[in-house]
């Protein structure tokens, strides 16, 4: 059922739309070296085959999982020989991100010479996985997961095609059941066709005349072990944790618990999620609601004690609470500003009045001299006592926001800072 023309491809409407740059170049036979980046089953191999057909070029495919440098060199030598005879070669490299730098570099002179039209396929972000020399010689085209509606179109074609598909087998399947298959495929056309084929093999005969119906009971058997796409170490992983973090920060509890559920469903380590949620409690909730950090630690501990599935609920409650409560990154910004000053000012001496003086010698040297014990001062604060090295002067890092508990903290600190400023400006 692999498409034999661009019009027969389902999905990729943005990339292969009539009039698009890629489509025009392919139809004109002016194919360039490229990297196709997209999820499994979106049509990367099919597009590479079509490129060879439209360019009237030989097609050769290798897999970075199965091929080593000797095989790569052999394929490149064969392509160079064909090139000398006036025929181009489309070299399709599946899972190209699995090649190391030396293996990737082997393609460079052949791409520049034009002896191969390089088409690399990857499910990983090329900017992270491919070296810059290879990327500079290729255009990166992003391919998308195929929509449910487009997968249904592919399934209809398979049911009607007697030569390459399942036509002529007397199969009957309703539109809702086709959509069930398409949804279970999770954007992967190849997976959808496989599921349809399995369903056709176990479908029961209905009327004794050779008609076979794919029923809901049939699909329950076929789709019992359906799983969603999730790469525990790739872009999808980091995109989803980013979505969870930003949903919490944006006070959207519904989105937060959705992304948490997606990651747990995909097999993400719950301990990793507990750690990231704890970070959110510190970074994004902060002192606007100090209870958030305590709840994060408790939820983490609850998961460690209960495991899944009971512990999943503790993480879900935490995500909902973090997204719903008041937010402040004031402590996060204060610490970042303090670290910046540490780097800028280097090793400054501690003011004498703030130094420790546990021995007679240190007292004689002036350590602790002039220190004012704050509990003995009016209001419990010695307002004119400096807290920073002299070269820096007094600094303000922590600026509480007017949300949650920080409203009270802001009121108190603003008043203390005003009093300290007046005390420093008062004549001696």
Image (spheres, rainbow, N blue to C red):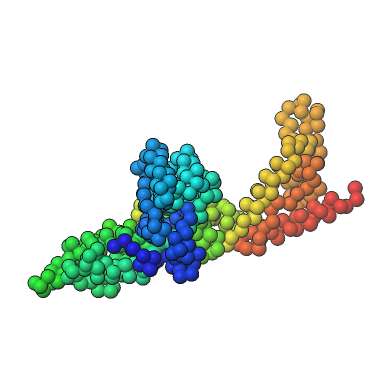
Q: Residue furthest front?
A: 85
Residue 219: quarter of image: bottom left
* Residue 301 in view of the camera: no
Q: Nearer the viewer, residue 355 or 224?
A: 224
Residue at the spot 81% in from the left edge and 48% down from the top edge: 384
Any part of residue 117 in sight? yes
* Residue 359 versus residue 35 in the image, above or below: above
Residue 339 % position (x, y)? 67, 44
Q: Is residue 120 left or right of residue 136?
A: left
Question: Which residue is pictured at 48% across the width and 55% down the height?
Answer: 32
Q: Nearer the viewer, residue 62 or 97?
A: 62
Is 257 in front, or is 150?
A: 150
Residue under the point 60% across and 62% down: 404
Residue reaching furthest to the right: 427
Residue 257 vertical position relative to residue 307 in the rendered view, above or below:
below
The N terminus - image quarter = bottom left
| Residue that lies at the very extreme toward the left in this rendered image | 208
Which residue is most to the top? 361
The part of the image, by quadrant, that contains residue 159 is bottom left
Q: Residue at x 39, y 57 (%)?
A: 56
Residue 334 on image: x %, y %: 67, 51
List x then y, in percent, for residue 88. Answer: 42, 51
How many discs mark residues in the rendered view? Answer: 0
- Position of 328 compared to 79: left or right? right
Whether residue 356 is situated above or below residue 78 in the rendered picture: above
Q: Is residue 399 above or below residue 13?
A: above
Q: Is residue 70 left or right of residue 279?
A: left
Residue 232 % position (x, y): 41, 50
Instruction: Work out whether residue 379 or residue 129 is closer to the camera in this orientation and state it.
Output: 129
């Amino acid at each position: 059922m692999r498409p034999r023309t661009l019009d027969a491809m389902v999905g990729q409407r943005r990339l292969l739309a009539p009039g698009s740059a890629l489509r025009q170049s392919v139809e004109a036979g002016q194919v360039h070296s490229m990297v196709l980046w997209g999820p499994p089953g979106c049509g990367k191999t099919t597009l590479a085959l079509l490129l060879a057909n439209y360019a009237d070029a030989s097609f050769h495919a290798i897999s970075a999982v199965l091929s080593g440098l000797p095989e790569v060199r052999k394929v490149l030598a064969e392509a160079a020989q064909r090139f000398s005879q006036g025929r181009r070669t489309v070299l399709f490299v599946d899972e190209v991100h699995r090649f190391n730098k030396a293996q990737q570099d082997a393609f460079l002179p052949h791409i520049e010479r034009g002896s191969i039209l390089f088409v690399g396929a990857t499910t990983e972000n090329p900017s992270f996985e491919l070296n810059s020399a290879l990327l500079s010689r290729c255009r990166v085209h992003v391919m998308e997961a195929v929509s449910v509606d487009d997968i249904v179109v592919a399934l209809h074609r398979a049911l009607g095609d007697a030569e390459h598909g399942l036509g002529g087998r007397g199969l009957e399947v309703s539109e809702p059941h086709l959509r069930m298959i398409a949804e279970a495929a999770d954007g992967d056309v190849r997976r959808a066709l496989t599921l349809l084929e399995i369903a056709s093999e176990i479908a029961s005969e209905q009327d004794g005349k050779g008609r076979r119906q794919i029923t809901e009971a049939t699909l329950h058997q076929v789709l019992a072990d359906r799983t969603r796409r999730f790469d525990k170490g790739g872009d999808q992983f980091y995109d989803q944790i980013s979505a969870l973090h930003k949903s919490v920060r944006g006070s959207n509890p519904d989105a937060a618990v959705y992304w948490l559920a997606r990651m747990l469903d995909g097999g993400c380590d719950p301990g990793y999620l507990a750690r990231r949620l704890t970070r959110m409690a510190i970074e994004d909730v902060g002192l606007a609601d100090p209870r958030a950090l305590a709840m994060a630690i408790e939820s983490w501990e609850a998961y460690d004690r209960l495991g899944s599935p009971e512990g999943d609920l503790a993480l879900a409650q935490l995500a909902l609470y973090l997204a719903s409560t008041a937010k402040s990154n004031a402590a996060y910004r204060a610490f970042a500003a303090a670290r910046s000053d540490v780097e800028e000012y280097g090793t400054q001496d501690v003011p004498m009045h703030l130094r420790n003086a546990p021995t007679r010698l240190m007292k004689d040297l002036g350590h602790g001299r002039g220190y004012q014990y704050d509990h003995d001062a009016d209001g419990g604060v010695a307002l004119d006592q400096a807290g920073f090295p002299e070269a820096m002067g007094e600094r303000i890092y922590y600026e509480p926001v007017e949300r949650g508990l920080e409203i009270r903290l802001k009121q108190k600190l603003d008043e203390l800072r005003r009093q300290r400023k007046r005390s420093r400006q008062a004549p001696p």
